[in-house]
Amino acid sequence: MREQLKGHLDLLLLAAVQAGPAHGYAIAQELRARSDGVFDLAEGTLYPALRRLEDAGLLHSAWKTVQGRRRRVYALTPRGREALTEHTEEWRRFSHGVGSVLGGVRWEPAG
Amino acid sequence: MGARWLIDGYVRELGRLLPVGPLARRRVLAEARAHLDDLADEAEAGGLDQRAAQLSAVDRFGEPDAVAASFGVGRRRSPVRLSRPRAVAAVLVAGATAAAIALALSLPDEPPTPGAAAAGRIDEAGRVVEPPAERPPPVGTSTLAPSARSRGTMPAASGSPPSPPAAVLVSDRPPVVALATPLSQSVAVTRRGRTVLVPRHAAIRLLDPGRFPELRGRRVQLRGPGAGNGAYALSPDGRGFAVAADVGGLGVELVDLSGMRNLGTIPLGIVGEQAERGRRTWIRTVSWPRPDRVLVIVQTNLPPYASRIGLRRIMVVDPLAGRVVRRVDLRVRGIVGRAVPVGEQTLLLVTRGERRSVVVIDPEGRWSTRPLPRSLARPATWPEPAVQGGRALVPVPGRAELVAISADLEIETIELRGETSALVDQAWSIAGFLPTGELVAVAPSEGGVLLIDPANWTARVLDAGATGASVAGDLVLTFVRPGGPGEAVDARGITAFDALGSVRYRALTEQDVASVQVAGPYVHVVVLAAGPQPWTTVGVLLDAATGDELAPLPGNGVGARNPVQLTLLEGTGEA
């Protein structure tokens, strides 16, 4: 599952900060909670991905003190929001396709 | 919180291994330290002692060499390679079926090659001529069914937003084309028989729309589907079919549906995927507004992360001459939806943040854009408009508003009042049109199927308790969608209403109906079967006119979690 998760981490990270700015620990919690524990990855690997997304202009970040601890807080940029929308659309299309195959939708002649 | 020497040591080790500069190292370590402390706090709150909590924290954070290495990998790789969802999707979909229209990546690099040939062509009278002419014939005024230009285009039947096309179900009694959801590329249309495109083989076959046995006749193998998201268009008379293709470059593959012949591919002069350059170009949507004009909207995505939308281009293709005749830059920002034909115009809905606009393109590629009022702002999953005659009707979930685009394409916003209050604050969708011109709308969350008269925007409730509807000729078939596993369902089967609101018949009254798909004279119904498996389903074939149960459909393999959703796409004109 971890290997599969890595392939989609960027999209998931964008989705995790969609509701509002969050720091790395909160993002990891969000991923774990929203996936019912399915997405349980080495949390340190979030940060390179966050940096990549920031470098790509999809996230921006700033230091803030949250609950007495200094943290880097990440938020979606307008471009990130657009990318999220587009990637989500594509992912849904793709997963719908896969789900259909696995779910047995078939259009083969019944006769 | 006492001293956390294990975490201290972890952070030191991570700092030693990080392949980044001092500034970046300081930032990474500060973030890591805060995160590790949070994890340790969480573990201690969960009852672990301090040492165990630290061990738990570093374990969850990951081995320091792996974490450090991931920074190095991330900084050396081209950002576009990190666009994993698309890449994985493309690979997997392509692997799942050769017919898959994956998310094709390519780059417009070379100009179109005028005259580069399709393998065949449709002549000006709509006949197929042999491939490929050395010299393209002159383009003249085509007689390809001008009377059939204003076709109805309808989004998905009630309940859910339209899904991407995959399989197309077609019947000619009455002439309809329907899209089934998932997977990959398939399409079909027919002559006097019926046709279904089987996804896995990317071939067009003639199938009976009742139980889908294959009819005798020629199959049409598609050579190159795989560009974009399965974009395709039917010719104005419904006999020609153009689908996005990628055969050594982007193109439009043409099929003569009346003769079941593949006419070949018209190249767009745009090379295929160039992953090494971190860019990709794909066919976003296709429109066939006039017999001699196919419009192909090509979009380039740019690095980093293939997230920036670069140039969009309208490729104006002459299917009669088999060549690209014009390229027009489409300089609009935002996400572009599927092309929707309205007469000879093509509409694109564009979403950019909270802004919405409509792009109107004429058959020669000239375009203009009209912003929509900000009051219509809504999430990006904007349903495609339904089209009838010269009007495009855009459903706006969550609002009791419609955007009407009249024949002259003037946009006006109309608020529904008074007797239409049932629509207020409900997310509703369009199920289709009745022959009377009335619009069948469904409010799935609260329930209720309504008939709306687009002439005066008055609405009346047809079935207040229904959460789904499909249109079958002059009847509206309503039903109640079942909830999830364990949720109570209201078994009431299907109720057929006429346009006056009278109940014509009820069918399957003891069944929980998951979906209703209309294909010509038949109605395919997915019902939940009783038994230990809450999602077990069986399919039933009904006579649309009478509701008589014609046959069970044991072999259709439809699951209730993912019932096939046939989307009535287009009527081909002649009943």
Image (cartoon, coloured by chain):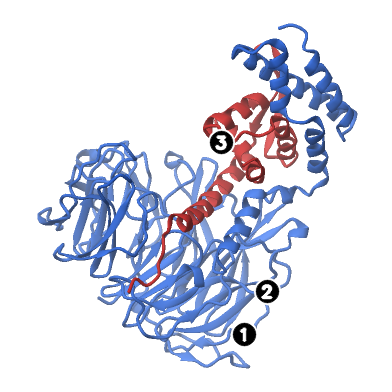
User: Which quarter of the rendering shows the N terminus of chain B?
Assistant: top right
How crowded pointer 3 is (Cα within 10 Å; few <14, some 14-19, many 20+) is rated as few
- The amino acid pointed to by label 1 is Ala
Residue occupying image coordinates x 68% and y 79%? B113
**Horizontal and vertical percent position of residue A77:** 65, 36
Type of amino acid at the residue the image marks with label 2: Gly
Query: What count of labels does the image hold?
Result: 3
Q: In the depicted view, which residue is nearer to us: A28 or B468?
A: A28
Q: Quadrant of residue B343?
A: bottom left
Q: Tell me the SS state at disc 1.
A: loop
The label nearer to you, 2 versus 1, is 2
Looking at the image, is B510 positioned above or below residue A31? below
Residue B254 drawn above or below residue B532: below
Q: Position of residue B106 (x, y in %)?
A: 68, 64
Shown colour of chain B: blue
Query: Disc 2 and disc 3: Cα gap in Å?
Result: 40 Å
Point out which mark residue B117 bears: 1
Query: Which residue sits at x=80%, y=43%?
Result: B73
Secondary structure beneath dot 3 equals: loop
- Identify the chain drawn in red: A
Q: Chain of mark 2?
A: B
Where A23 falls versus B532 (above or below)? above
Q: Are marks 3 and 1 in contact (CB under 8 Å)?
A: no
Have a look at marks 2 and 1 and say if they share a chain.
yes
Q: Which residue is mark 2?
A: B248
Question: Label 3 belongs to which residue?
Answer: A38
